[in-house]
Structures are given as C-alpha cells and as structure tokens.
Image (tube, rainbow, N blue to C red):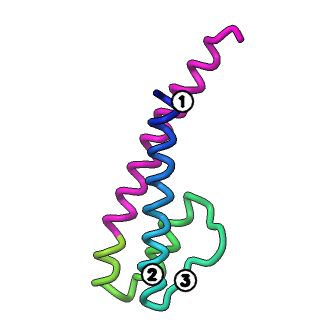
Amino acid sequence: MLLANRKTLLVKYGDIENEVRGTLRAFGLKLSGRIASGRFEQRAMELVEDRPRLAAMVRPMLIARAALREQCAVLHKMLLDAVARDDT
C-alpha cells in the first residue's frame, strides 16, 4: 500500500509539472529540458515575473507541486525505514 500511495504522489507531481510546462508553452515560454526539482519553481516564476495574470495561474500549481513533493518525501522515508527494519 505504501508503494502504491508513493507512486500516486509521484505521478501527480509529474502531471502538475507537465501542466505548468504546457501552460507556459501556450504563452510562448519554455522550460526546456530537464530542470532540477529545486530549480523548476524558480525558473517558472522567472519566466512569468513580468506577466502577473500568468503568474497568478502558475503559482497555485507550483504550490501544489511543492506540497506533493514534500508528502512524497514523507512516504519515501517511511518506505526506507520499512526496508531497513526488514531482515531480507
């Protein structure tokens, strides 16, 4: 169950990241290539800093993405703890 829950959060995290990329692309802005997780939010906000309405759309998505990342880390730690306790 732990693996399934962790996977669900990872999938939703990726979905939101792709949605942000798509939203920016619709306005001619591109987050090109693979961007480190910590830099993604910063780069996205840099791209929309002069477009307040677009920033207002993207910001909630980035907040949700950050929350998913944080909670995924919680489940990942639980998984690592379970593995460490298992003799096999």
Compare residues 72 and 43 and report the one nearer the observer. 72
Mark with earlier residue (1, 3): 3
- In which quadrant of the rendered view does residue 66 lie? bottom left
Tell me the element at label 2. helix
Q: Which of the 4 image quarters holds residue 85? A: top right
Q: Position of residue 1 (x, y in %)?
A: 46, 27
Q: Amino acid at mark 2?
A: Leu
Nearest to N terminus: mark 2 or mark 3: 2
- How far is mark 2 from mark 3, CA to CA? 6 Å
Circle 1 residues within 10 Å: few <14, some 14–19, many ≥20: few
Q: Residues within 10 Å of mark 3 (few under 14, many from 20)?
A: some
Task: Look at mark 2 in the image and give the residue it sits on.
Answer: 24
74 left or right of 64 in image: right
Does residue 56 sit above or below 16 in this rendering? below
* Residue 63 shown in magenta: yes
Tag 3's secondary structure?
A: loop
Q: Residues within 10 Å of mark 2 (few under 14, many from 20)?
A: many
Q: Is 58 displayed left or right of 40 in the figure?
A: left
Q: Residue furthest right?
A: 88
Q: Which residue is mark 1?
A: 77
Per the rendering, the mark at residue 14 is none
Q: Residue at x 44, y 74 (%)?
A: 45
User: Height in image: 12 above or below 32?
Assistant: above
For the point 49% across and 51% down, the residue is 11
Taking the spot 65% from the left edge, 67% from the top edge, the residue there is 34
Query: What's the amino acid at mark 1?
Result: Lys
Tell me residue 2's x, y (percent).
48, 28
Image position of 43 with respect to 17: above or below? below
Q: Is residue 17 magenta?
A: no
Majority secondary structure of the magenta segment?
helix
State which region is magenta: 59-88
